[in-house]
Amino acid sequence: MLTKNPRVVFAKRPGTGVPVPGEHVVFERSHSIDLDGVPLNGGFLTKTLMLSPEPFMRERMRDLCVASYSTHAVLGEPLVSFGLVVVLRSEKEGINPGDHLYGLTTWEVYTVQPYIEGRAKYNPAAAPDYTFDVDALSLQVVPDPKGAFPWSRYFTVLGAPGLTAFCGFEGCADAKPGETIYISSGASAVGIVVVQLAKAKGLKVIASAGADSKVEYMRSLGADVAFNYKTTSIVEVLKEHGPLDIYWDNVGGETFEAAIEYSRLHARLVMCGSISEYTIAPEARYGIKNTSMIFKKRLRIEGFLVPDLAPRLAPRFYAEMPALVAAGKITAKEHITEGLENGPAALADVLKEGGNEAAGKPIILVATE
Amino acid sequence: MLTKNPRVVFAKRPGTGVPVPGEHVVFERSHSIDLDGVPLNGGFLTKTLMLSPEPFMRERMRDLCVASYSTHAVLGEPLVSFGLVVVLRSEKEGINPGDHLYGLTTWEVYTVQPYIEGRAKYNPAAAPDYTFDVDALSLQVVPDPKGAFPWSRYFTVLGAPGLTAFCGFEGCADAKPGETIYISSGASAVGIVVVQLAKAKGLKVIASAGADSKVEYMRSLGADVAFNYKTTSIVEVLKEHGPLDIYWDNVGGETFEAAIEYSRLHARLVMCGSISEYTIAPEARYGIKNTSMIFKKRLRIEGFLVPDLAPRLAPRFYAEMPALVAAGKITAKEHITEGLENGPAALADVLKEGGNEAAGKPIILVATE
């Protein structure tokens, strides 16, 4: 018996700009699947419960000639992002029906894992050495929180964003109590964890976001200075509340330049993302003119991705963070959109200039168990 | 009996551009000194033998409202740079007539040290925390090489440039045999030492300069790929001979951007100077647009100045380097200009766009003993 298997496919490269729902990223109901009969080939069948639209998905839609840290998304195939799935059938040892898994998965309701046909053609010898094969990253079983926290926390503080924040903060920021940190995109899933880790360490926290609801949320998490960069000048805030010992960069461009300008001697700048630049052409990007300050102030600017630091720091993260979350000492918030059909719009919302309006990590609720 | 005491004074702030001899930087013969009778007030009287025009002198001539890593030069007073002096009279313990000293000194023939009247007014509480009081840095006795090498080596491999190269290379570059390094301004006093340290460690060395004579010189020091950036595209060279594991930045701007573009995963970029930017207005500086590569390639960009690293590394430098130089294993070259009256033009030559033409560290021969 066939069951409808709705999906969201990558239909067309957007060039510059935000991918347009229905044009570049398309919701489809044309596929079906035989849930009982589909061959698993040693893998397992999952049902997608939740998906998160992510900035890195845009980077994968870039033109084929442009190298980056991620392999290219495959045209005609479902999008790939972090997701929470439940196992329906399995031929794989260690994976059992009813298991919940979190990790990279495809934007469709039912998936035979691993999803082979949609994998990017990746030849390590031909790609730059800094490129990750995103499609090769796998799902991992996550424990049932049994009501201690919602499943959606695996998308924020207990998932990739939380691990990213933990690795960058513990591995690169070199934070000391009493220091001042500025966190751009401080209401993002990564940002809110950095805000809380920094407060727990006794830092003064400055945080910015692009909506008043997010400013309110950052303040509720303990940020000492929270502001809306659309209505308040970043430079004025840093002039008044800086100088900075640490800058956590999620946005790049002008904000990065302002942070360099208001950094203290020997400040550390942790480069985690560059959301202001993903949808614009390289030549249209903001040009940073104060880089001579790097030697004048003896700054250390360090880029990282989780896989670089996880071997050293993930064990601590998994040992410490779930208990802190269960005890309510570290919190998070998810903003739920219902229905995979609303996925393309949710992705566009994350990528649009200035970001989305609602506080909380955007999550698409695909199905219930 | 009075003796003429020629000097070069800082007469007028240049705003943007290279200081013009006779206008911003002026040679004068109006001062005299009584060599036998001038009060020493517990200090000592020196005769200047050699001086070096240096890019950092330009930074000190900036407008008073602009903060930087150095205190401002004082209008109406002699310029200050690295110099080699010999002691004529002394009231200071440990300093004796006939001693040679190297360090920061004033651009005049005779000086009562320390030179108090020309000191920048420096209030540490009012200045940014990354500002050095240049005028407070002192002269140090240097041993007589007794013919093993010329005195002028104290301006290159055995002086501030050599120590700068050693501190940055040993402290920030994290170099491993077989890696590739690109050194901009590779024929500068700092650059040539980095070239030689890198070759000694088994690195592949790419080095650029702005004159064919300098390219020839870098090649003679062992650079594997040496080129004139005025006639050869930096991007083309890095595309062919990169990617880079290490970039040593002496120039900033477009060159820095190209180095980021052709860096390998986890490359280290050591920020030592920004010669392309000292004489232009902040808004006219080149804007770097590829800073998102810092996180994509997980780069580490680190600025340093010698005083940050010297406490840890200077003892090794002074223990190892003189012997290497005496044995001819590390070499250097100085380009001598005779006469303090030619000092202003020599300084302008160092600062002009594209730099001076001659290979070798520019030195002004002020007097003989």
Image (cartoon, coloured by chain):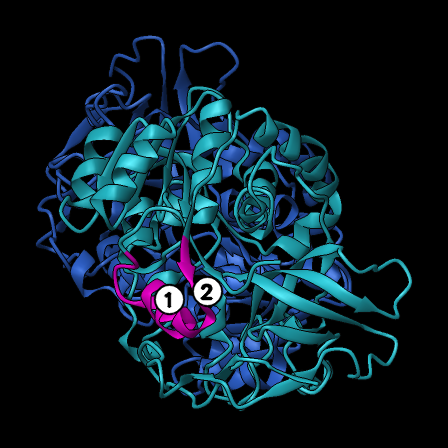
Chain colours: A cyan, B blue
Would you call the spot at circle 1 few (<14 residues within 10 Å), some (14-19), or many (20 or more)? many
* Residues marked 1 and 2 touching at CB (< 8 Å): yes
Name the quarter where the N terminus of chain B is drawn: top left
The residue under label 2 is A53
Eyeballing the image, is A162 above or below B319? below
Eyeballing the image, is A281 above or below B106? below
Residue at 13 percent across and 47 percent down: it is A231
Q: Amino acid at mark 1?
A: Ala
B327 to the left or right of B11: right
The residue under label 1 is A346
Would you call the spot at circle 2 few (<14 residues within 10 Å), some (14-19), or many (20 or more)? many
Q: Position of residue B127 (x, y in %)?
A: 24, 27
Q: Give the quarter of the image for residue A135.
A: bottom right
Residue at 52 percent across and 77 percent down: it is B215
Residue B362 in view here? yes
Eyeballing the image, is A359 above or below B20? above
Which region of the structure is painted magenta? A336-356
Closest to the observer, B299 or B355: B299
Q: Amino acid at mark 2?
A: Pro
Q: Secondary structure at mark 1?
A: helix
Residue at 39 percent across and 70 percent down: it is A342
Closest to the observer, B248 or B71: B248
